[in-house]
Amino acid sequence: MIDYFINAFATLFVTIDPVGLAPMFLAVTAGMSRADRRRVAIRATLTAAAILLVFYVSGQTVLNVLGISVSAFRVAGGILLFLIAIEMIFGKRQERKSETVEKAVDPETHRRTVNELAIFPLAIPLISGPAAISAIILLSSQAPDTLTYAGLGGVIAIILLSCLGAFLLADKIERLLGDTAQLVITRLLGVLLAALSVQFVADGVLTFVRA
């Protein structure tokens, strides 16, 4: 059970990347007051929590309705996470996230409202993106019992609270880490996610072979 929780925490932390979201939050909320930034941070986190909760609770049901086996989803989810890991290792993911932010906030046009910013691009797709949703469905399908499944909910809550904390402390995190440290951390997390994704694929293929 401990190994499962460590694996779940590492997978979700690397996939959602709360620390890496801090500079994105600063870019999106540029020019806002401290109170407005706090409102955006809270609403974005709550919105993302609602989205992830849906897939945490009904992810297995969705697979059953679509006729997709858990093994197939493990392989597909592992491949998706591996692609995310490659982007992180080679610095492409940060560029893609920056492009998403630039599309959402154009300084030459009108400034988006607090609700709009909280939903897009913060809640979707920066926090609860396809990779995070895939990881949650994948991890929930691997839970061996009800207690472990409930514990996964706690892990998800911790990750979301980390996102909220990163948003509220975004300016301090950016000053503390600096560009070089952020690049190093992102690449190290990418290598870790790559290893975890390969394990997901291996588990799925092994289940196919045994069947």
Image: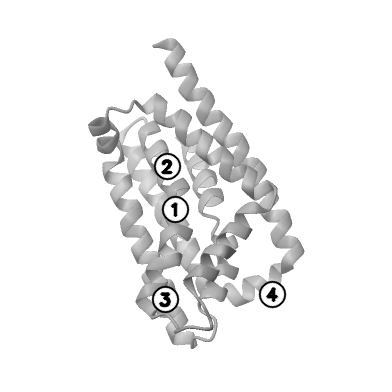
Q: Crowdedness of circle 3 by 10 Å Cα count: few (<14), some, many (20+)?
A: many
Q: Residue 175 has which mark?
A: 4
Q: Quadrant of the N terminus?
A: top left
Q: Circle 3 sits on which residue?
A: 40
Q: Earlier in the sequence, mark 2 or mark 3?
A: 3
Mark 2 and mark 4: span between their CA atoms?
32 Å
Helix, strand or loop under label 4 = helix
Q: Residues within 10 Å of mark 1 (few under 14, many from 20)?
A: some
Closer to us: mark 3 or mark 1?
1
In this view, which residue lies farthest toward the front? 108
Marks 2 and 3, how far apart in space? Answer: 25 Å
Give the distance between the C-alpha atoms of the residues marked 3 and 1, in whole angstroms.
18 Å
Please state which amino acid type lies under the numbered disc 2.
Ser
Task: Give coordinates of residue 66: x percent, y percent.
Answer: 27, 32
Whether residues under marks 3 and 1 lie with C-beta atoms below 8 angstroms apart, the answer is no
Q: Are marks 2 and 3 in contact (CB under 8 Å)?
A: no
Q: Quadrant of residue 96?
A: bottom right
What x and y, as percent, mark residue 49?
35, 59
Q: Residue furthest top?
A: 210
Q: Position of residue 136 (x, y in %)?
A: 40, 43
Residue where numbered disc 1 is placed: 129
Is residue 67 found left or right of 182 in the rendered image? Answer: left
Q: What residue do we see at 69% from left, 55% from top? A: 185
Task: Provide the secondary structure element on which disc 3 rests.
Answer: helix
Q: Any mark on residue 134, and which?
A: 2
Instruction: Identify the amino acid type marked 4.
Output: Arg
The reply to whether residue 166 is in sight is: no
User: What's the residue at 25%, 36% (across, down)?
Assistant: 61
| Image side of residue 83 versus residue 209, left or right | right
